[in-house]
Amino acid sequence: MIAAGWGQVDVLPCTTLNSAPVAVSGASDGTVRIWDLNTHRQVGEPLTGHTAGVRAMVCTTIADQPVAVTSASDRTVRIWDLSERRQMGAPITRHNYVSRTLACTVADGRSIAITGGADYALLVWDLATRLQIGKPLTGHTDPVTHIAFAEMDGHLIAVSGARDETVRLWDLATHEQIGPPLTNGARRLWLLGCTVIEGRSVAITREWERTVQRGRWVIRVWDLTTRQEIATPLAEAHCNRLLACPVLQGRPLALTHEGGSTVQVWDLSARRRLGRSLTSSVGRVTAAACAMVDDRLLAVTGGENHTIRLWDLAAPEQVSQPLPGHSGPVWATACSTVEGRNVAVSTGYDATLRLWDLSSGQPVRAPLVGHAHRVNALACTMVHGRPVAVTGADDATVRVWDLSARHQIGPALDGHTRSVFAVACTSLQATPVAVSCGLDGMLRVWDLAAQRLLGPPLDTHGHQAKALAWTVVAGRPIIVTGGLDTTIRLWDPAAHRQIGTPLTGHTAAVNAVACTSVDGRLLAVSAGDDFAVRLWDLATRRQIPEVLTGHTASVTTVACAVVGGRPVAVTGAKDRTVRIWNLRRGTCEVLRMPDEVWAVTLSEEGSLVIGSGQEVVVMEMRG
């Protein structure tokens, strides 16, 4: 339990601050407070400025800086820099009445918010400039109570609910309503929120249904594209509010609240309650959110007794001390087999290398340490029949690790003069090799058996490769790189030269690249800061016209495999989603993650390993 200040906690989102999971609380005393979920302590002094109780709050980013956006009964919307713990600029004061609800997202690289209140209108704001975007969204005839963002047909839309008991969909490009309000015959609907179930964007609503003996609250789930109800409703849910929609081990959940001291947890796919309720013994629950803390999905609840409580959703039991794990974002993952066990290997900001048993999900002994700064890149291979990992880091070194013996092999491989961004492993003329690249603009090929540089480095002439992959084209091995200069380049490691001219198409830095084969055609798959996933025919060295779009923030990672006979690419992004693309059909499945996604890996056994925030998530891919 965390003592939360002098007022009733009314809003309580969670985010990551300086690589640590935090909760941000807004209370009836008008203060905003930041709480470290690892130490259970308040971070700094309260943030003050509101002159009345905080009614709504969302955590988001502006130019990659974590911020909180709050709305209060003083009729202002304020933006808070969570790192500096100060208000950003003047408050927003356009609503005629109290703004009771708000939502935030990033659209086309711009951080935006939508506010709604007692004046029946929804206003769209550019958070960087604090200026209104376009005309108000009008149509509701009573105060707006809920706003959410969703994706429909590949486009970002807003979904709103109001006391007029209608649910309305809005086109954010035109600021017009999309079709008539969502209805269930003659019954009126109360919007609770939006989420994604099995790749479909859905709205969750409640309504009062009369029965022979008495009435009951019913929760319904609606497909936003078809406007049809999905499966059977959740009856007897006793729900006034939807507090959060987290994902636990690949299952979409809903946390609902009836207004008292109990929070119920629902499995939306299975249409049933999950475990027992979360019940506070010391007062009414008024706010809740979810956060990943050291490998556990926690519910964070706040109440009228001025406290914040943490609950393990897998148990569910109130949490005392968190489990150990990565203490910063996971930048890279890979898979290997160690002593007969299929394992995932992860590394990142905390500079440690950790192994996880894919069967049990448990860590395999203590982490490996050696790098002096954060590790950006990881690859696994075999050297002399032993499983090894190769890492590259901000300390400008490449290191090789014996995963069975649990120690570093030899000294660090020196040569790079700046951060190493990417490594990949293969075999060159029967010699196990690794290639590394980074900010110094050099590609280096290493003989892993002899622990030495293999030939002179390749000068990329300002390319500054952030991503690389190995493949074989027409019988010869080649290196494919993507760089800060927005280009894709091909390299002949044997001849130590670039192949042809750069491949252009991306409009921002390329963060990830992987290679695969689709119907006999060898492809490279790249992704970057332009939010796009692009395909390249390596034989013709031309881009395939169809660009895979859907991510709404920088795409950070990509992996390729064949699953159930389907060639797939898996991408992860800062929009907190993992997308699984069928490269033959161009279709896409979406997985919502608890934090920004920095790493994805597909094992030969079909396990999908995801680095999301400080969490390593393992899922089984089905054909």
Image (spheres, grey):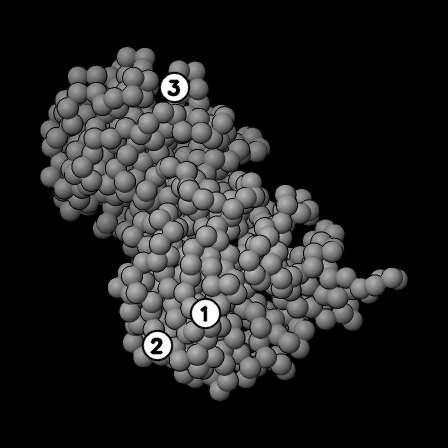
Residue 439 picture location, percent across and down: 17, 44
Frontmost of labels 2 and 3 is 2
Pick the front one: 383 or 50: 50
Cα distance in 3D space between marks 3 and 1:
53 Å
Q: What is the crowding at mark 3: few (fewer than 14 residues within 10 Å), some, or many (at least 20)? A: some
The mark tally for this picture is 3
Q: Which residue is mark 3?
A: 338
Residue 421 picture location, percent across and down: 24, 40
Query: Residue lying furthest bottom in this view?
Result: 96
Q: Which residue occupies 54% across, 44% down?
A: 317
Frontmost of labels 3 and 1 is 1
Element at badge 1? loop
Q: Amino acid at mark 2?
A: Gly
Cα distance in 3D space between marks 1 and 2:
15 Å
Q: Which residue is mark 1?
A: 7
Please identify the quarter of the rendering in which residue 110 is found.
bottom left
Pick the front one: 154 or 367: 367
Q: Is residue 590 visible?
A: no
Of callouts 1 and 2, which one flags the residue occurring earlier in the amino acid sequence? 1
Q: Which residue occupies 49% across, 27% down?
A: 360
Element at badge 2? loop
Q: Which residue is mark 2?
A: 49
Cα distance in 3D space between marks 2 and 3:
55 Å
Q: Amino acid at mark 3?
A: Val
Residue 140 badge = none
Query: Residue lying furthest right in this view?
Result: 212
Q: Which residue occupies 59% across, 52% down?
A: 279
